[in-house]
Amino acid sequence: MPKQTKPKQKQTTEDDLALLDELGLDTVPEKPKKLSAKEERIIAGFEEIEHFVEEQGRLPQHGEHRDIFERLYAVRLDRLRESKECRKVLQSIDSRGLLEADNDGHPPLEEDITDEDLLSTLGLDATTGNDITQLKHVRSRAEIKSAEEIAQRNPCEDFEQFKPVFENVQNDLDTGLRKTLKYQDNAAVNQGDMFILDGHKVIVAEMDAPFIADYGRQDRRLRVVYDNATESDLLMRSLQRSLNKDRASRRITTPDFGPLFSQVEAEDDYPTGYIYVLRSQSDDPFIAEHRSVVHKIGVTSGDVKQRIANAKKDPTYLLADVEIVTTFKLANINAKKLEALLQKFFSSARLDVELQDRFGTAVKPREWFLVPLEVIEQAIEKIREGTIGQFRYDPNTASLKQL
């Protein structure tokens, strides 16, 4: 088959130009018009909208459930349609007819509107610290709400049970008792673990039995509670993927009280010591009525009996004799940290009482709690096991609840 060749394009000759000149036609090529900075900005913004339409096959839409940039393009397109100046600049390049649709009755375009102005229209802060060009970690709503990655969040009906947990955790973060660490890819997730995901503190409240999912991998169904009073029922691997995708995700550590039951003595450790639980013999009507659950919890390095010898004269002991209910012998323990841990753990059940010492000074004892003895013993056992961070004390049921 003979090879086809393109016909040679005829070149414009001097004779052609002379003929065109005789016909009165201008043969001088028109110089391209130089655009102002504002016109260039208008065209650049319009081209972003055109690119969106080309990719999505539709016009950008308004709505809080839409991606932030789609909402930005929708507002921008409305403004461009309403501006005579913008329509004049864009008329020759609007090949898709995007400017011809009716507007939605938004206010007229300002003289020199910017992306920051458009973001402000959306109710978003666009100050220097929140420059739109710096929104590196913003993910689309479609991605955030992907059914595979994040299950539907529903109102948490028993959030009052979790609210004090989140409040205590925030206080621990503020005081340095807890820290946040970058979540490591597919790191372990256990019941009671806490994370920061999509800007919210979350807690793994429940964890079902493991099962074998696709590709022979083990998975578990979780109940995850968020600090905005919502919860979701999702798979462990879905939570892990969400934590991996969120560049700002963090793991919240358990309280850092240092070594409590160490094999190596620290500077302020006791060679031997005791956790002791006391019961007051006070005739105060309230204490008498609740005597079986009103306990003082403390730690000492000496003899407990010697320490309580003058209890009747000491407001710390409610100005009454006390009964030693039980003691736990310890060795190589950081007493200050242990006391802080115990008192913080039972802080929701602290006895609110004020007494006057022998000088008439008001004293509020801080080591008395409305807690059953068996629950105190359970808490001490959790400290021994190193799992106390996975539990909280529920004063309504007078029991330990796993987080």
Image: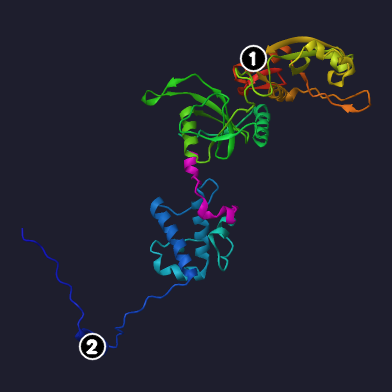
Q: Which residue is mark 2?
A: 18
Q: Quadrant of residue 266?
A: top right
Which quadrant would the C terminus be assigned to in this image? top right
Q: Name the residue rendered at 55%, 35% in the picture.
A: 181
Q: How is the image coloured?
A: rainbow
Classify 181 as above or below 105: above
Judge from the rendering whether residue 229 lies leftward or rightward of residue 83; answer left or right. Answer: right
Which label is found at residue 230? Answer: none
- Is 129 one of the magenta-colored residues? yes
Q: Marks 1 and 2, how far apart in space?
A: 106 Å
Q: Is residue 61 visible?
A: no
Specify the segment rendered in magenta: 122-145
Mark 1 or 2: in front is 1
Q: Residues within 10 Å of mark 2 (few under 14, many from 20)?
A: few
Q: Which residue is mark 1?
A: 381
Judge from the rendering whether residue 167 lies leftward or rightward of residue 96; answer left or right. Answer: right
Classify 356 as above or below 138: above
Q: Name the residue rendered at 50%, 71% in the picture.
A: 85
* Amino acid identity at mark 1: Glu
Q: Quadrant of residue 27?
A: bottom left
Residue 78, given in percent of the width and then of the height, sits at: 52, 60
Judge from the rendering whether residue 10 lies leftward or rightward of residue 313; answer left or right. Answer: left
Q: Quadrant of residue 391?
A: top right
Classify 119 as above or below 336: below
